[in-house]
Structures are given as structure tokens and as C-alpha cells.
Image: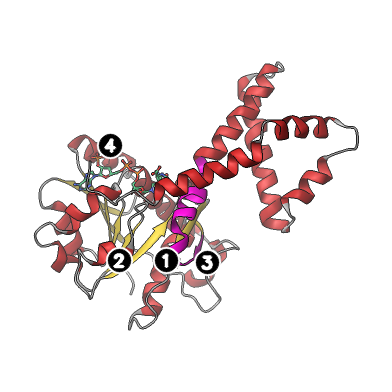
Amino acid sequence: MSGYTLAVIGCGTMGVAILSGVFDSQRQILSSNAASLSSSVASLSKPGTTATDEDDLTQLPSRFIACVNRTESVRRLRKTFANAPDVDVVAGAGENVKAAQKADVVILACKPNMVKDILEEDGMRDAVDGKLVISICAGLRIQQMREWVTPGTKVVRAMPNTPCKIREGMTILSPLPPNLPTLALDRSILLSIFSAVGKCRFLDEKHFDACTALAGSGPAFACVFLEAMADGGVMMGLPRTEALELAAQTMQGAARMVMQSGMHPAAIKDSVTTPGGCTIAGLLNLEDGKVRSTVARTIQAAAEHASGLGQTTKK
Ligand SMILES: NC(=O)C1=CN([C@@H]2O[C@H](COP(=O)(O)OP(=O)(O)OC[C@H]3O[C@@H](n4cnc5c(N)ncnc54)[C@H](OP(=O)(O)O)[C@@H]3O)[C@@H](O)[C@H]2O)C=CC1
Ligand SMILES: O=C(O)[C@@H]1CCC=N1
């Protein structure tokens, strides 16, 4: 399927992050000198994606509809997407249904507790019938959403994160039903969209609350550590701007060493730690603060909370 329409219902922080990443990816493809679109897209996909050489990663949408709630958001998004390809930004009664009717693929990116009302709006069941509906909503189960759509609607979950905006996202995708007649195409669409904005991989839905905490919320947790490292530098006299740059580049470098060299984090830590040196002095201080269990328990707390999201219609 080429030149299809993607509707994002609830185009806030994450909707904008995903669309911005897709648009950047498309610009890069268009300006690429690669011989074919396919090889160009393949070269843009990152190691770590679930995609194999057989997967077609060219299935990106060419038309977009962004649905929001308030007219001020419409104005803001029209500015944000002023230089983007074919994007309609809409809000108001009946606009979600009209967007879903026009779309081939729908991303639900509203708050989890709004999905039921949105899917049960008059006309929505028919509008999404037979289509791929991708929910990025934390906590909301596929089984719940299936009750609000026709049996022919293909509901999957994706758990992306905010770095999708700069195409450094991490997205976890729930598996498609194996007996689906359109399995290959739907898999290509999912992989094309989410590998355009970073890495993505399929994992069973039972892991989604953990993934939500680790990858979805993770940028917030990582930024607390990053900010604290910078604060330490400031405490020791570094200017704030330089302290932030040092902290961010150092975290990025360490993370890339894990990703690219496959080194275990403990091996990287050990390689930095000179006997009797300053690193071990700092590490012992970290351990006194129970940083490992605090961080691990943070993921546990966020995952446990995620499992309750979307389980009531309470606003
Ligand atoms: N933020 C994150 O890092 C992540 C969030 N998620 C999930 O993504 C989803 C969205 O989160 P986030 O982007 O942070 O939330 P936001 O609040 O930024 O975005 C929600 C959007 O929904 C719109 N909206 C509200 N009501 C309606 C409606 N009736 N019809 C259409 N659109 C509507 C809002 O419009 P308006 O702007 O006009 O109010 C807003 O643009 C959540 O379910 C969350 O669990 C998943 C991974 C990471
Ligand atoms: O905090 C939240 O609920 C959402 C889901 C993951 C990141 N933000």
C-alpha cells in the first residue's frame, strides 16, 4: 500500500513526536542520493529493530490527519507542521470520526481514559472497521479495545517514547494476530512508521507495563540523573551550560557504548574505575545512596502504576 493516510487521534506531545520524526525521516529519504527508496529507508533503520532484510520498510504514509481537542492546539499544530507534507489539523465534534473514515491507519495517542469514548462515538466503529488501529496509550489492553470496535478491526499496541521526535525513539510493538490475511502489509506499516523514528521491536503484550515504565517513562528518569550530574558539576564550579553538555554527552556516549559495542554496563564501569582513583570514590557514594535499588524500584513503581491506567473512565 503506498500513499496511504494516517490519522493521529489525540495529537499532543507523543503524536507530534511521532509525526515530526516521520516527516524528518521522509525529508532525509527525499534528499538521499541512494539508488532506490527501499535501500534508502533500509539504510535509515537502526540496528536493534525487529525488521529483517525481508521486511519492506517503505510503507510510510503520505497524508496525515492530526486530531486535537482545542482550537488553540489546531493553531499551534498548524504552525508546527507548516513545512510538513500533506497534514490536516482538525478539532471539534465529529472530526475524529471523519478523520478515521478518511484514514487507512489510525494511531490513538489521546489519554488512556478517553479511548473508550472516542471509539464508541457514533460512526467510529464503521470508520475503523477492517483498519489498523495502533494504540500508544499506557495501560489500556488490546482485549479492552476490542470490545469497542468491530471484530474486523486490527488493534495493536505500540509503546514509543519522546525521543521519537529526533528519530532516536524506542518503540515496543505488540504482535499482530498470526492468522491475519494482511499480516505482511500490516507488519511493514508498523515497522516502517516506528523504525523511521528510532528503534522498534515486537514484544508480547504482557510486557507492556514494564516497557511503558522503562522506555516510555525512561526519558524522564534519565533526565533526572542527567540533571543531577550537571548539578554536581555546577556545585564544583562548572558553568551550568557546560555542565549540562558534559552530562548529556557523557550519558549518550556511555549508552552508545552499550548499544554499539555490546559491552556490558558493568564492564564499562570497571574500565573507568582506576584502583584507588576518583571513580571508585564516587561509585561508593552512589551505592551508599542505594541508587541501584532506587532506580530499579522506580521502574517497578511506574510499571505498577501503568497497569492501572485506562482501567477506569475517570477523567
Ligand atoms: N508523553 C509520553 O512520553 C508518552 C505518552 N504515551 C501515551 O501517549 C498518550 C498521549 O500522551 P501525551 O502525548 O503525553 O498526551 P498529551 O496530553 O500531550 O496529548 C493528548 C492529546 O489528546 C488531545 N485530545 C483530547 N481530547 C481529545 C478528543 N476528544 N479528540 C481528539 N483529541 C483529543 C489533546 O488535544 P488538546 O491539545 O487540544 O488538548 C492532546 O493534543 C497517552 O495515552 C500516554 O499514555 C506513551 C508513551 C510516552
Ligand atoms: O506518564 C505517563 O503515563 C506516560 C506513559 C509513558 C510516559 N508517559
What percent of the width, then of the height, locates residue 281? 81, 30
Mark 3 Cα shell of 10 Å, populated few (<14), some (14-19), many (≥20): some
Could you tell me how far apart the alpha carbons at marks 3 and 1 are, in whole angstroms? 26 Å
The residue carrying mark 3 is 40
Q: Is residue 209 magenta?
A: yes
Span highlighted in magenta in the image: 200-219
Amino acid on which disc 3 is placed: Ser
Quadrant location of the N terminus in the rendered image: bottom left
Which of labels 3 and 4 is toward the front?
A: 4
Quadrant the C terminus occupies: top left
Q: Nearer the viewer, mark 1 or mark 4?
A: 1
Q: Secondary structure at mark 3?
A: helix
Task: For ligand 1, tell me if the residue under mark 4 lies within 8 Å.
Answer: yes
| Label 1 sits on residue | 174
Earlier-in-chain disc, 3 versus 4? 3
Q: Circle 2 is placed at which residue position?
A: 143
**Nearest to N terminus: mark 2 or mark 4:** 4
Q: Are marks 3 and 1 in contact (CB under 8 Å)?
A: no
- Front residue of 273/248: it is 273
Dot 3 or dot 1: first in sequence order is 3
Give the quarter of the image for residue 2. Answer: bottom left
Q: CA distance from mark 3 to mark 4?
A: 32 Å
177 left or right of 110 in image: right
Numbered badge on residue 76 = 4
Q: Earlier in the sequence, mark 1 or mark 2?
A: 2
Q: The disc labelled 4 sits on which kind of residue?
A: Arg
Spatial CA span between label 2 and label 3:
37 Å
Q: Which residue is located at x 49 percent, y 46 percent?
A: 163
Q: Position of residue 202 (x, y in %)?
A: 48, 67
| Circle 2/circle 3 CB separation < 8 Å | no
